[in-house]
C-alpha cells in the first residue's frame, strides 16, 4: 500500500514539475536497507512548497501538526492519503547543542530510481546519515547506514566532508571523520 501511494504522489509531483525528494525510511528501504517504512516523508524545494501543499491537499486529508523541538522546520504539513501518513516539509531544521542545523535541499539532493516506470527521486543517504544523528532516538538508523557504507562504500563523500564545516555538534563531526577514515 505504501508503494502504490508513493508512486501515485510521485507521478503527480513529477507532472507538476515540483522539485522534491523522498526521504527517511522509504529512502532507506529503496536503498536496500532492512527497514519497514510506515509513512512517507517528502522534502520539497522551498520555491515549490505552496504548489506541493495545494497538490497534497487535493490528494488527501490534511492533519494539524504543531511544531515540536528539536524540529524548527519552517514548512511542515501532515496528510493522510489512502490510509498512509505523509509528512511533507521544506527548510528542514533541527535544533542541537551548538545551534541549528539546516538540511539544504535542492534538485541536486536526490538520486533517481525507477519504480514501476515512475521516477522516484530519493534523497541522499549521506544527508540522512547526518540528519539521523541529530534526530532523537534514531541511533539504530545511524548504525544501519554505517553498515551500509562499510558494505557498499560512500558514493557522495563530499556531502559528509562538507558537513564538517557546518554547524554540527563536535561528537557528530568526530563520528563523520571516523567513518570517512575507515572506508
Image: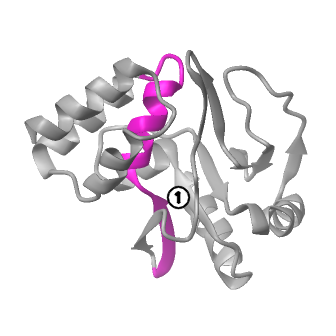
Position of 67 with respect to 143 (left or right) is right
Q: Is residue 128 magenta?
A: yes
Position of 70 with respect to 178 (left or right) is right
Asked whether 155 or 11 is in front, the reply is 155
Q: Residues within 10 Å of mark 1 (few under 14, many from 20)?
A: few
Position of 63 with respect to 162 (left or right) is right
Name the residue located 30 percent from the left edge and 46 percent from the top edge.
Answer: 161
Residue stretch in magenta: 117-138
Disc 1 is placed on an element classified as helix
The colour scheme used here is one colour
Asked whether 107 or 142 is in front, the reply is 107
Position of 143 with respect to 98 (left or right) is left
Quadrant that contains the C terminus: top left
Name the residue located 72 percent from the left edge and 48 percent from the top edge.
Answer: 89
Which of the 4 image quadrants contains residue 64?
top right
Where residue 116 appears, as percent x and y from the top left, is 45, 76
Q: Which residue is mark 1?
A: 3
Where residue 65 appears, as percent x and y from the top left, is 84, 32
Q: Tell me, yes or no, if residue 28 can be seen here.
A: no
Name the residue located 72 percent from the left edge and 45 percent from the top edge.
Answer: 83
- Residue 111's place in the image compared with 183, above or below, is below
- Residue 172's place in the image compared with 56, above or below, is above
The total number of labels drawn is 1
Q: Residue furthest front?
A: 165
Which of the 4 image quadrants contains residue 9?
bottom right
- Residue 81's place in the image compared with 121, above or below, is above
Where residue 57 appears, as percent x and y from the top left, is 88, 59
Amino acid at each position: 500500500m505504501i508503494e502504490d501511494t508513493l508512486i501515485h504522489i510521485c507521478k503527480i509531483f513529477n507532472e507538476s514539475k515540483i522539485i522534491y525528494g523522498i526521504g527517511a525510511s522509504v529512502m532507506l528501504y529503496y536503498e536496500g536497507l532492512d527497514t519497514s517504512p510506515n509513512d512517507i516523508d517528502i522534502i520539497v524545494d522551498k520555491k515549490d512548497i505552496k504548489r506541493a501543499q495545494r497538490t497534497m491537499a487535493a490528494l488527501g486529508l490534511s492533519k494539524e501538526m504543531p511544531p515540536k523541538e528539536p524540529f524548527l522546520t519552517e514548512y511542515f504539513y501532515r496528510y493522510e492519503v489512502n490510509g498512509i501518513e505523509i509528512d511533507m516539509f521544506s527548510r528542514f531544521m533541527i535544533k542541537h547543542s551548538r545551534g541549528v542545523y539546516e538540511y539544504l535541499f535542492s534538485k541536486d539532493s536526490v538520486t533517481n530510481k525507477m519504480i514501476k516506470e515512475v521516477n522516484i527521486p530519493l534523497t541522499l543517504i549521506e544527508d540522512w546519515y547526518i540528519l539521523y544523528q541529530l534526530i532523537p532516538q534514531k541511533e539504530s538508523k545511524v548504525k544501519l547506514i554505517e553498515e551500509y557504507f562499510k558494505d557498499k562504500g560512500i558514493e557522495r563523500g563530499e556531502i559528509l566532508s562538507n558537513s564538517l564545516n557546518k554547524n554540527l555538534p563536535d561528537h557528530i563531526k568526530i563520528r563523520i571523520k571516523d567513518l570517512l577514515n575507515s572506508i
